Amino acid sequence: MNNTSFDDADFPAYTMGRAADMIGVTPAFLRSLGAAGLIEPERSLGGHRRYSRHQLQLATRVRQLLDEGMPITAACRIVKLEDRLAAAHRRILDLGGTLTPDDDADIPTQTHPDIAKTQYYRAP
């Protein structure tokens, strides 16, 4: 096995037990993420699940959202969308484009600025 395999975030390097230990969850939690359609681990020749660093990052993010009280289906959907947005940003940069601070998904955006501001109207 060459060193580039270990540099690849998508290389399935971790067994289920090791992966669960690394991110502080149970193997059942990792299986539930597979059932929810978030991550699909590779299988070894013996049929054992193998996880990549990228998959473990997604699982860690789901765990954070669950700890904040979010249902697993919503947490998985959010993580999928965050991952797709990050991939789109990488693609833009790979194609020579640029991103502005407004494009940064880590910065919360205010979707309805007028809601927080009281407005008064004159009576007719």
Image (cartoon, grey):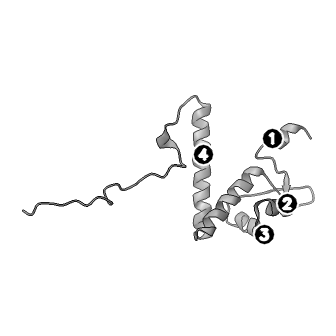
Residue at image location 45% in from the left, 51% down from the top = 109
- Kindly report which numbered mark, 4 or 2, lies closer to the viewer in this rendering: 2
Q: Earlier along the polypeptide chain: callout 1 or callout 2?
A: 1
Provide residue 37's location: percent of width, then percent of height: 68, 62
Q: Which image quadrant for residue 35?
A: bottom right
Residue behind mark 1:
7
Residue behind mark 3:
26
The label shown at residue 86 is: 4
Residue at image location 57% in from the left, 35% down from the top = 92
Q: Which image quadrant for residue 45?
A: bottom right
Pointer 3 local density, CA inside 10 Å: few below 14, some 14–19, many at least 20 = some
Q: Earlier along the polypeptide chain: callout 3 or callout 1?
A: 1
Instruction: Say if mark 4 contacts mark 2, CB within 8 Å.
Output: no
- Residue type at mark 3: give it: Thr
Pointer 2 local density, CA inside 10 Å: few below 14, some 14–19, many at least 20 = some
Single out the residue that lies furthest toward the left: 124
Provide residue 94's location: percent of width, then percent of height: 62, 32
Residue at image location 59% in from the left, 71% down from the top = 71
The label shown at residue 43 is: none
Residue in front for this viewpoint, 59 or 121:
121
